[in-house]
Amino acid sequence: MAWDPQTQTLAIAGTKTFGDVMVDATIPFGNLLQHTKRYQDALTEFRKRSPARVIGHSLGGELASRISKEHPEANTQFLLFGTPRIQYVEDDPRVTSYKHVGDPIAMFDQAAHQTLRLGNPHSYRGFNPY
């Protein structure tokens, strides 16, 4: 996780370690993700910082999505990139998701705004959410 005090943005990275791969494996099983250390660490940072914006890529996007659901009262913008979630329409105006055409990780996020990117379709590069 990274904190930018100037923009009040909390960034949550995607899968990086073997432990993260194990966390990824819990995603299809509902709320098991919320019992992981990775989620608890992200939630602690969110509560500590009260960020204006949370940006998450891949697993980080799923963590951010879960935090948004747990804190509907938060005045926070959530930007999700290449998130492994099943979503047909976005029902939370604070959440905006993005994916590249052909991203195998985010293929079930039908609420995501799509862009075409040559190269790795699961990259967080090439988006302009502002």
Image (cartoon, helix red, strand yellow):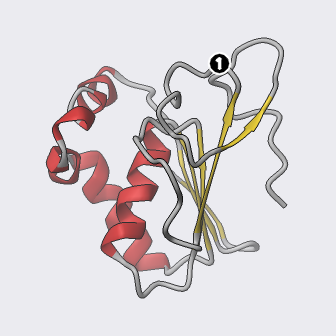
> Quadrant location of residue 116?
top right
Q: In this orientation, which residue lies closer to the viewer: 111 or 103? A: 111
Residue 44 appears left or right of 101: left
Q: Residue at x 25, y 58 (%)?
A: 40
Q: In this orientation, which residue lies closer to the viewer: 18 or 99? A: 99
Instruction: Inspect the image, locate mark 1, and give the three-letter code of the amino acid beneath it.
Output: Gly
Residue 23 appears left or right of 82: left
Residue 83 appears left or right of 126: left
Q: Residue at x 37, y 24 (%)?
A: 17
Q: Position of residue 97 (x, y in %)?
A: 61, 50
> Quadrant location of residue 16?
top left
Q: In this orientation, which residue lies closer to the viewer: 42 or 5? A: 42
Q: Residue at x 55, y 85 (%)?
A: 75
Quarter of the C terminus within the rendering: bottom right
Q: Position of residue 1 (x, y in %)?
A: 50, 51
For label 1, the SS is loop
* Vertical arrangement, residue 97 with respect to residue 96, above or below: above
Counting the numbered discs, the total is 1
Residue 123 appears left or right of 35: right
* Vertical arrangement, residue 35 with respect to residue 51, above or below: above
Q: What residue did someone put label 1 on?
A: 102
* Vertical arrangement, residue 26 with respect to residue 39, above or below: above
Q: Residue at x 74, y 72 (%)?
A: 7
Q: Position of residue 83 (x, y in %)?
A: 50, 39
Give the class, few, some or many, for how many residues have Cα within 10 Å of label 1's Cα (few <14, many ≥20).
Answer: some
> Quadrant location of residue 34?
bottom left
Most extreme residue toward the front is 88
